[in-house]
Amino acid sequence: MIAPEDFARLGPLDVVAEVQPYHLSDDMRWMEERIGAERCRGAYAFKSIVESGATLCFGTDWPGTSAAEYPISPLLGLYASVTRQTVTGDPPGGWFPEQRITIEEAIRAYTLGTAYANFEDESKGSLEAGKLADLTVLDRNLLEIEPRELLETEVLYTIVDGKIVYQRSLP
């Protein structure tokens, strides 16, 4: 949780905000009751972090904590960050919906943001000549679908160092 007055400091301090976006789907169930709605405004405040100029870096936190097991799928994190809802669509409109980010911003957080946080952005995180060819091919274009379709998106291939290490079996 970030205090409202601290968001303006994130960019100038070159902060890397490493967050697991899927956690908001679980934490929203209890957080307001325990710490109050006003303090919750600074939790998972993806839009405010991006707007501050800080680097937003996403992960899955797999396998999770002692309280809950979190799925390894970054697609669920993408969904949570752009909808701010559970996989069942609650709450309608999203939890603090003003903190939703675009799918482009969410993908950047999982790719270039994470590479930057690991001091690997010169070799990973974006598709450029000379960088490692680690990527995933999905069955749909994430930039053209409705957020709900993220939950149905399937991995067709996973490529690591230019080699196919996973290929989905076709029926």
Image (spheres, rainbow, N blue to C red):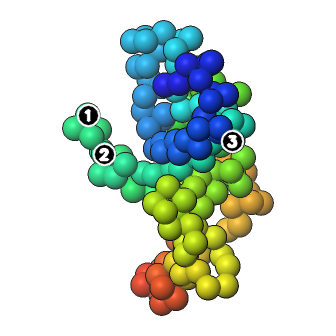
Would you place residue 152 above or below residue 139 in this image? above
Residue 150: which quarter of the image? bottom right
Q: Amino acid at mark 2?
A: Gly
Q: Amino acid at mark 1?
A: Ala
Residue 90, given in percent of the width and then of the height, sits at: 56, 30
Residue 64: which quarter of the image? top left
Disc 3 target residue: 53
Residue 79, given in percent of the width and then of the height, sits at: 59, 47
Identify the mark at residue 144; answer none if there is no mark.
none
| Relative depth, front residue between 97 and 19 | 19
Answer whether labels 2 and 3 touch (C-beta < 8 Å): no
Q: Is residue 18 visible?
A: yes
Q: How many residues crowd around disc 1 within 10 Å: few (fewer than 14), some, or many (20 or more)?
A: few
Identify the mark at residue 67; answer none if there is no mark.
1
Residue 68: which quarter of the image? top left
- Mark nearest the camera among 3 and 1 is 3
Q: Earlier in the sequence, mark 2 or mark 3?
A: 3
Q: Secondary structure at mark 1?
A: loop
Disc 2 target residue: 64
Q: Residue at x 72, y 37 (%)?
A: 51
Alpha carbon of mark 1 to alpha carbon of mark 2: how far?
8 Å
Q: Amino acid at mark 3?
A: Gly
| Relative depth, front residue between 2 and 28 | 2
Answer whether labels 1 and 2 touch (C-beta < 8 Å): yes
Alpha carbon of mark 2 to alpha carbon of mark 3: how far?
28 Å
Answer with left or right where residue 157 lies relative to residue 31.
Answer: right
